[in-house]
Image (cartoon, grey):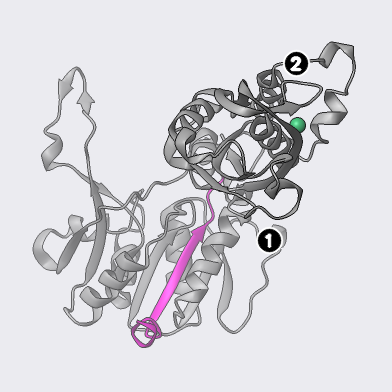
Amino acid sequence: MTSINSKIHFILLAGGDSLRFSSNSNKLLAKFKNKNLLNYNIEFIKELKFKKISLVVKNIKKTDIKSNNDLEIIKGGKTRSESVKNALNKSNFKSKYVIIHDAARPLNSKKIINEITKNLINKKYDCVVPYNKCSDTVVVKHKNLDRDKLKLIKTPQGFLKNKITYLHNKYNKKKLNDDSQLFRYEKNKYKLKYILQNEINIKITYKGELETLNKLIENNIFVGIGYDIHRTIMTNKNNLLKLGGAKIKSKVKVISHSDGDVILHAITDSILGALSLRDIGTYFPNNKKNLNRNSIDFLNYALNKMNSKKKMINNIDLMIVSEEPKINPHFKKILDSISKNLNINKNIISIKATTNEKSGLIGRGDFIACWSNISLRDS
Ligand code: ZN
């Protein structure tokens, strides 16, 4: 792909005035991934090693992108077509092929660019255009159009450079939304290829579209760890012990100021940790109010904090160390209870249990402990 691309001049259009995006902001400078839309696009295109990139901007003085050996900056015109024409006529770069792309389309596809170059160079098409099929109902003056016949035309588009330059100069006065239109004006005079693109390829026009897109792609993960241990005493009669909110029959009794649910305490601390907050003890000290307190209250406190910070649980991994009770016989009950109390699917909960092989205080059955490792993400 690299060698093919080195024959191509790439024109990136960033000259629009973004009036529909917001009255006072340029959409191409809005945040996308960890960059802005424009820089994100330039980085993507640079990776593909085209012969030269021409960046077309409205105001060269206001651009902080610098020209270099691989990239030149060209002043755009009043309309999209004028901007393309400027790039085609004023660029110093000589090449047989050109690809023209709108910088407002951030969902670039190497696969589509590869298909464009192959059709241009190997199959000798004059114009190669990707399109999406239309799956929405389209209504014009109360009448439905036959959507199966519709093509939603996209960029990047590839051309034989001398032909697209000729047509742009010939149809100088026409107002164009895309460059392939020029080849449709000429009916069957040129070889035009449409490529069906199944991937999403949207043009960011409204602010809300970029917000939705950012929400879909952002994958900020916040990790938290929690640990809890409680003393247990053997009573040789059946006690009801709380583990993950479930009531488990056991010969041991847990010594605790609250209800002593080590699993919920560890989970609560891990959520607080992932939110960069303090620990359970800070919010629920060992005072009269918290005596024999239901640990669900601690958990709900942390979950409310999580919700108010617009985060959700991504996954949770628990390690319980207990000699008595044995965890495995109660595994399903504990899993069900954690799933219900955290309001998450069981397939993102991992519960591992071990004994301490009768060594140390836990091994002797004097303690029960739990580690919780949790990851949260933006909700
Ligand atoms: Zn505890």
Residue 379 vs residue 262, the one in the foreground: 262
Left or right of 4 in this view: 281: right
Q: Identify residue type, mark 1.
A: Thr
Residue 342 vs residue 378, the one in the foreground: 342
Q: Position of residue 95 (x, y in %)?
A: 38, 84
Residue 90 — which label? Answer: none
Residue 297 vs residue 122, the one in the foreground: 297
The part of the chain drawn in magenta is: 1-17
Q: Quadrant of ligand 1?
A: top right
Q: Secondary structure at mark 2?
A: loop
Q: Identify residue type, mark 2.
A: Arg
Which residue corresponds to the image point at 70% horizontal and 18% vertical from the top-left? Answer: 297
Q: What crowding class fits label 2: few (fewer than 14 Cα within 10 Å), some (14-19), or many (20 or more)?
A: some
Which residue corresponds to the image point at 12% horizontal and 58% vertical from the top-left? Answer: 187
Is residue 25 among the parts visible in the rendering? yes
User: Relative to 365, does residue 82 appear above or below in the rendering?
Assistant: below
According to the picture, the residue beneath numbered tag 1 turns out to be 63
Q: Position of residue 265 (x, y in %)?
A: 71, 32
Say which quadrant the C terminus sits in.
top right
According to the picture, the residue beneath numbered tag 2 turns out to be 293
Is residue 55 among the parts visible in the rendering? no
Q: Position of residue 324 (x, y in %)?
A: 61, 38
Say which quadrant the N terminus sits in.
bottom left
Q: How many marks?
A: 2
Q: Secondary structure at mark 1?
A: loop
Which residue corresponds to the image point at 50% horizontal and 67% vertical from the top-left? Answer: 44
User: Relative to 260, does residue 77 appear above or below in the rendering?
Assistant: below
Residue 90 magenta-highlighted: no
Left or right of 71 in this view: 227: right
Q: What crowding class fits label 1: few (fewer than 14 Cα within 10 Å), some (14-19), or many (20 or more)?
A: few
